[in-house]
Image (spheres, helix red, strand yellow):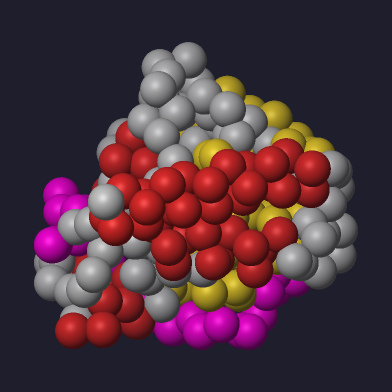
Amino acid sequence: MRITTHGDSLIQLTRWPWLFPVNVYLVREEDGFTLIDTGVWGGAKSILAAARAHGGEIVRIALTHADSDHVLGLDALRAQLPDAEVLMTSRSARRLAGDRSLDPDERGGRVKRLGGGNVQQTTPTGLLRHGDRVGSLEVIASPGHSPDHIAFLDRRDGTLIAGDAFQTRGGMAVSGVIRPTFPFPALATWHKPFALASAGRLRALDPARLAVGHGDVLDNPLAAMDAAIAEASRGSTTELAGHAG
Ligand SMILES: [Zn+2]
């Protein structure tokens, strides 16, 4: 696992950095670490070791969304961290319990069912909503990649942990815009217009640093976010024109 630190509070842990990078994040707080996302299977030991090597224990786990590459480590971590808080949206909890269905107001995206292979036995100790705080992090609703997607803004230094709302691997992109060398987040995207709207809302937070589920951390990301949003907007116009034709 590749480990990189960014500023005073953020540590990125990357499984398979060259092949199919999957990131989780340790966010330093006074009482220990918040772990954002849990990665794929088999990573729990390395994640726990990384936290200890950086001087703390994981005291809470929070999820950006319930796609398998973000949640498959949850049960294994929970077994080792019985006292940690486990935080997610109610929508993510429903997915982790095995419900892949879309609500009536969630139809109209490009998928008929949400991704599977993500069921976990662990249930949340607390549910997150837009505007909640998780330590220093503020919860930002950002549906689009998936209906349950949230991001986390560190109010201390402007770090935005954006999950899969953006990717940086293969070239910066809004969720839903295909990067040929790493197309997977786009292929898994539930609703492109919502993803574009959420990308704009995340950009409007003026983050000083962008940390995503797949790809490297980017400092001073605003210009790159603007370019990615502009590209996604052009794509959606083209698609609309295509439908009209
Ligand atoms: Zn992902």
168 and 51: which one is in front?
Answer: 168
Reply above or below: 159 against 136: above
> What percent of the width, then of the height, locates residue 188?
29, 46
> Can you give x and y, in whole percent of width and height, for residue 44 in the image?
40, 41
Q: Is residue 75 left or right of residue 98?
A: right
Instruction: Decide whether the magenta segment is chiefly helix, strand or loop.
Output: loop
**Looking at the picture, how far across and down is residue 142, in whole percent?**
51, 68
Where is residue 67 drawn, in percent x and y? 31, 53
Residue 124 lies in quadrant: bottom left
Image position of 91 with respect to 2: above or below: below
Q: In this image, 198 relative to 5: left or right?
A: left
For the residue pair 207 and 23, the one nearer the viewer reads as 207
Q: Is residue 166 visible?
A: no
User: In the image, what residue occupies the spot 29% across and 41% down?
Assistant: 187
Q: Tell me if 71 is positioned left or right of 169 in this view.
A: left
- Magenta span has 89? no
Which span is picked out in magenta? 112-138
Can residue 142 be seen here? The reply is yes
Please check the rendered image and state whether residue 123 is part of the magenta-colored stretch, yes or no. Answer: yes
Residue at (42%, 19%) from the top-left corner? 181
Q: Residue furthest top?
A: 18
In the displayed structure, does residue 154 sit left or right of residue 108? right
